[in-house]
Amino acid sequence: MNSEKRKDYISWDEYFMAIAQLSALRSKDPNSQVGACIVDSDKKIVGTGYNGFPTGCSDDFFPWAREGETLKTKYPYVCHAELNAILNSISRNLKGCTLYVVMFPCNECSKAIIQSGIKNIYYMLDKYPDSDSEKASKLLLDQAGVKYEQLNLNKKLILNL
């Protein structure tokens, strides 16, 4: 009988980022699949989300295009993973929580993150570091005292997105 615990288990950061990655697989977006997971100070998941259209809005009715006339693209209609995780959370009190998200949040999501009281963000991808949206996002987060860090995980996560 083995009296020692297993040594190759995943860390909390790997676990919660894998939940964010798993959530991303729910997205119908043909170009970007992003997932998010909100965790409280007791390491309990209180919200998850992925990028998609609002509840009641058909994935087949609205466009998924990235370019063209604004109303014929996905941008005015899609809710980002971070906002969905906040809106779908089981708690209305997210003060001090941590957000795990596949991609660094845009400035609009950062406003919602700040307003919700989330204090830490861990992200995997930094796809648009030179964009105005990300520059504004970082200014907002810095001003509000929200910490953010890119996770460079040693272990390969469950999913390869």
Image (spheres, grey):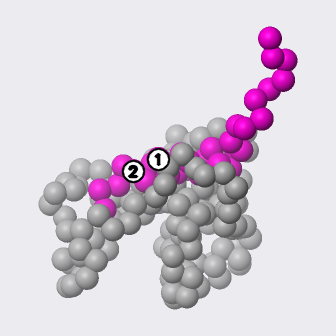
Rendered residue at 36%/49% (across/down): 26
- How far apart, in angstroms, are the residues tagged by discs 1 and 2? 5 Å
Quick check: 49 above or below 113? above
Tag of residue 25 = 2
- In the rendered image, which quarter is residue 117 located in? bottom right
Image position of 70 with respect to 118: above or below = below
Look at the image and say whether residue 10 sits in the magenta stretch: yes
Question: Residue 113: which quarter of the image?
Answer: bottom right
Task: State the mark number for residue 22.
Answer: 1
Residue drawn at x 72%, y 38% as measured from the top left: 8
> Percent x, y for residue 75?
31, 74
The answer to which image quadrant residue 9 occupies is top right
Residue farthest along the right direction in this orientation: 3
Going 35% across and 55% down the picture, which residue do you hit? 27
Q: Nearer the viewer, residue 92 or 4?
A: 4
Q: Are marks 1 and 2 in contact (CB under 8 Å)?
A: yes
Q: Is residue 115 visible?
A: no
Q: Is residue 11 above or below residue 57?
A: above
The amino acid type of the residue labelled 2 equals: Leu
Does the rendering let one see residue 12? yes
* Residue density around tag 1, few if under 14, some if 14–19, many if 20 or more, within 10 Å: many
Span colored in magenta = 1-29
Look at label 1 and name its amino acid: Leu
In the shown orientation, is residue 32 left or right of residue 123?
left
